[in-house]
Amino acid sequence: NHAISQVSGNPYLVVEGGGPGLYATTGASGDVQDLNGILSITMEIGGSFQPQAEMVKPLCDQTVAAGRVFLNEVLKAE
């Protein structure tokens, strides 16, 4: 969450699926991957499924920052 905050300048909350204010899902790809021992991540960044055009680049930057942290953590664990 620190990496995204550095890019966006805003705090970012990391929660496990079904966290506060999120909608419940079942049978999503993360569930299937977990059951099969496959590490996965699902990120939702931004406050809209259809962000304004000027928000696309900043949201992409935040997603890349989070993805890099995820990959670095995976590589450290091996």
Image (tube, helix red, strand yellow):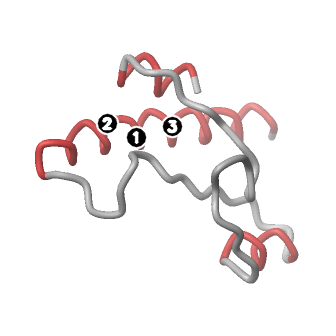
Q: Residue 20, relative to residue 58: is it above or below?
A: below
Quadrant occupied by the N terminus:
top right
Q: Secondary structure at mark 2?
A: helix
Mark seen at residue 66: 3
- Pick whichever of labels 3 and 2 is earlier in the sequence: 2
* Residue located 21% across and 48% down the image: 56
- Label 3 crowd bin: few (<14), some (14–19), many (20+), radius 10 Å: many
Question: Disc 3 and disc 2: Cα gap in Å?
Answer: 9 Å
Inspect the image, locate mark 2, and give the three-letter code of the amino acid beneath it. Asp
Disc 1 and disc 2 in contact, CB within 8 angstroms: yes
Question: Disc 1 and disc 3: Cα gap in Å?
Answer: 5 Å
On the image, which quarter does residue 73 sit in? Answer: top right
Q: Which residue is mark 2?
A: 61
Quadrant occupied by the C terminus:
top right
On the image, which quarter does residue 15 sit in? Answer: top right
Q: Is residue 71 left or right of residue 20?
A: left
Image coordinates for residue 36, horizontal then vertical, percent: 85, 76
Image coordinates for residue 28, horizontal then vertical, percent: 68, 78
Q: Is residue 37 left or right of residue 41?
A: right
Return the residue nearer the eye: 8 or 48: 48
- Label 2 crowd bin: few (<14), some (14–19), many (20+), radius 10 Å: some
Q: Is residue 45 left or right of residue 13?
A: left
Q: Which residue is mark 1?
A: 64
Q: Is residue 69 left or right of residue 78?
A: left
Inspect the image, locate mark 3, and give the three-letter code of the amino acid beneath it. Ala
Disc 1 and disc 3 in contact, CB within 8 angstroms: yes
Residue at the bottom extreme of this rendering: 27
Mark seen at residue 40: none
Q: Secondary structure at mark 3?
A: helix
Image coordinates for residue 4, horizontal then vertical, percent: 47, 27
* Residue located 17% across and 52% down the image: 52
